[in-house]
Image (cartoon, rainbow, N blue to C red):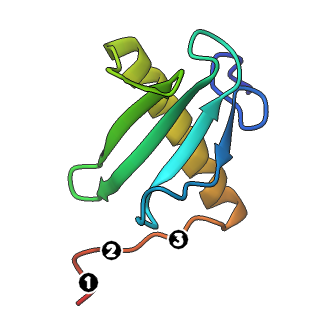
Amino acid sequence: MIDINKPLEGVDYTVVPISFIKDENAWQVQILRGLYADSYFVFTGIEYNGKTRNLRFKLDVVKDQALVRPDPDMQDYAFDVLNDIIHRGIADGSLVINDKDSSN
C-alpha cells in the first residue's frame, strides 16, 4: 500500500552533498515542496538503539540562509523524511549500519 502522506525522495525531498560537516553520519536534505519547501534539514548524530528501538538524531534547519528552530510539526516531518531515507537505504543496500558498541 502506498502512503500518499509519506515524503518521497525525488518528489518531496532530495539528499544533497554536505561539505561543511566532517561527519560521515551527517545527511543534508533539501525539502522540495510542501510547508517546508526550500528548507534544508541537516541530520547529525544519527544513532539507533536496538535494545530500546529508538532512533536519535540532531536536527538543524536552514531556511533563507538562516538557522531556524524546528517546531514539533517540523520535527515530525523531519523524522518521516529520515525514516524514508533509512528504509530506502536498507532496501537498496546503500545504508551501512555500524554497531558502535562492537567497534574498538
Instruction: State the SS at label 1.
Output: loop
The count of marks equals: 3
Label 3: element kind:
loop
Question: Considering the image in quadrants, where does the C terminus appear?
Answer: bottom left
Q: In which quarter of the view is residue 25 placed? A: bottom left
The quadrant holding residue 81 is top right
The answer to whether residue 67 is left or right of residue 7 is left
Reading the image, the residue beneath label 2 is 99
Q: Indicate the amino acid at tag 1.
A: Ser
Q: Residues within 10 Å of mark 2 (few under 14, many from 20)?
A: few
Residue 22 in picture, x, y percent from top left: 42, 66
Q: Position of residue 79 (x, y in %)?
A: 44, 32
Residue at the (46%, 67%) spot, across then down: 24
- Give the crowd class for mark 3: few <14, some 14-19, many >=20 residues within 10 Å: few
Q: Residue at x 54, y 45 (%)?
A: 28
Give residue 13's position: percent from left, percent from top.
Answer: 68, 32
Q: Amino acid at mark 3?
A: Val
Which residue position holds label 3? 96
Q: Earlier in the sequence, mark 3 or mark 1?
A: 3
**Which residue in the protein does label 1 denote?**
102
Between 99 and 32, the one lying in front of the other is 32
Outermost residue, right side: 10
Is there a contact, CB below 8 Å, between mark 1 and mark 2? yes
Which amino acid type corresponds to the residue marked 2 in the rendered image?
Asp
Q: Position of residue 48 (x, y in %)?
A: 32, 55
Quarter of the image where the N terminus is located: top right
**Residue at image point 47% right, 29% down:** 62
